[in-house]
Amino acid sequence: MELKDFMMMADKRVDELHELINLGMIYKKSNFLPGGIHYPYWTTYPKIEYEDIFKDYKLPENGEFDAYVHVPFCSTKCVFCHFPAMYKAPDEAKERFIDAVNKEMNITMNRLGLNKIKLRTALIAGGTSTDLTPNQLKKFLTNFTSKCDMSNTRQFNFDVSPHNLVGSTGIERLKILKDFGVTRLSIGVQSLHDDILRLMNRAHDKSVAISGIKNAQDMGFKVNIEFIYGYPTQTFESWFEDLKQMIALDADEIMLYRLKIDAHGDWQGNIKGYRTLHPDEFLTREDTLRMKQIAIDFLRENGYSENVNMRRVFTKKVKDYSLYAFHQCCNMKDQLAFGPSAYLSLNDRFLLNTSDFEKYYDCIEKGIMPVNRGLIRDSETQQRWAIIMPLKNRYVDKRFFKTQTGVDIETTTAYPIIKKLIEYGLAQESERDIRLTPKGAFFADEVVGLLYQTNHNPFPKDDFNEGPLNPYSLNMQKVC
């Protein structure tokens, strides 16, 4: 099938977008796009007193954690990126960071009374987690794994850039990752058009991306490749060509991200300033959603279906997806995190490390955790969190919901809103679970926004039309 053959369903999605805007569910116009892997958005979190970080916190019954490390280094500053990083950092800065994370892990373990972290899964990301020399990478992994009990680790993930995986040094890095038990690589390709890669200020071109992917596959890693759609100057034709080349790479997973203009966190990327200077280069929201639907249909036709365990991920085999992300977003497992701007997602709270590098290092030298903001969820926020995250990414298991919150979902203030979603064909309910319909799943980020408590809605009330699905109206009255 050719591009024109995929446009009919894409146009239908645009009609549905306008319908949902008119019904009051989707904000009329904004640079901010909903998404992320947390609720509420961390920009709303208040300062937290140090003694309250783990106040009344209960360790997981099985003692297991997932772990995240934010490695804040990159060789270039990508225009679209909203994560804090140091660019072209000298070796001494990287050594300082490796030593600090080692100390931070000790500080956290001492606070929790742990001799080792019983590791379920791990994700090392950034920044660029492989923007370390081979010797630095080896030192970092030696420190990290020495503090973890990895006897029951299911998956060890690294987010990497393809330019770190080529040449003799790239091969050496891959061997080190393999030796330390890393099993899965997420490779940030973003585009397979050199002109767009240059516009993004990526550190690689198309040929390097393909070589890096092949090297990782040859080494036996599970490989996830990541792409952005809706980028300035991107066209339907260039996106369709990207899709054709994606499937030729035969990766285990393909992950698609919609370009975000406004950051979800504290670190604003250059993309917002670029939009101010070059507004005509940006796609409309309608065309960006057309690109998403074209990708869904094209990938399905070529053997990649959206994974039933994690939306936005397209795989040939159901088992190929990030267990780390699944545990956080769908199974609500406890996750420890280390490094500047890293966040700890625990069973009743969310804690955020400072993104200020010097404040981070100052805390570590003082022997205290670098957490500066956090939210210990009350019962209402806990219930919304336990609905929003699984519903957006997979589905809400009713029995599991009760174990997380202590109540039946039918008794919550969110349940009448869920019934509205069902009434308008966006969700469906069975005795066992609540899940989104295909229409609801396409607009998953926007649909779950209906369930945001009004004090946590990122959009002002005036951004929505009045209508039966207006989130402010539904969250301020009893829905019949």
Image: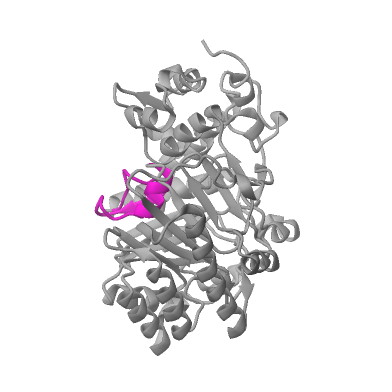
Q: Is residue 391 left or right of residue 315?
A: right
Dividing the picture into quadrants, the one containing residue 173 is: bottom left
**Nearer-the-camera pick, 2 or 378:** 378
User: Which residue sits furthest top?
Assistant: 480
**Nearer-the-camera pick, 100 or 247:** 100
- The magenta stretch spans residue 308: yes
User: Which residue sits furthest right?
Assistant: 277
- Tell me if I can see residue 214 in this picture: no
Which residue is at 37% across, 42% downward? 331
- The image position of residue 480, as x and y in percent, is 51, 10
Q: Is residue 87 left or right of residue 60?
A: right
**Nearer-the-camera pick, 47 or 169:** 47
- The image position of residue 308, as x and y in percent, is 31, 43
Q: Is residue 133 left or right of residue 331?
A: right
- The image position of residue 252, as x and y in percent, is 30, 61
- The image position of residue 470, as x and y in percent, is 60, 24
Residue 358 position (above or below residue 393)? below
Which residue is at 48% across, 84% downward? 133
Residue extent of the magenta highlight: 304-330
Dividing the picture into quadrants, the one containing residue 397 is: top left
**Nearer-the-camera pick, 133 or 241:** 133
Q: Is residue 318 left or right of residue 312?
A: left
- Tell me if I can see residue 260 in this picture: yes
Residue 57 position (above or below residue 259)? above
Total tally of numbered discs in the picture:
0
How is the model colour-coded?
one colour
- The magenta stretch spans residue 415: no
Which residue is at 45% across, 32% downward? 387
Residue 402 position (above or below residue 338)? above
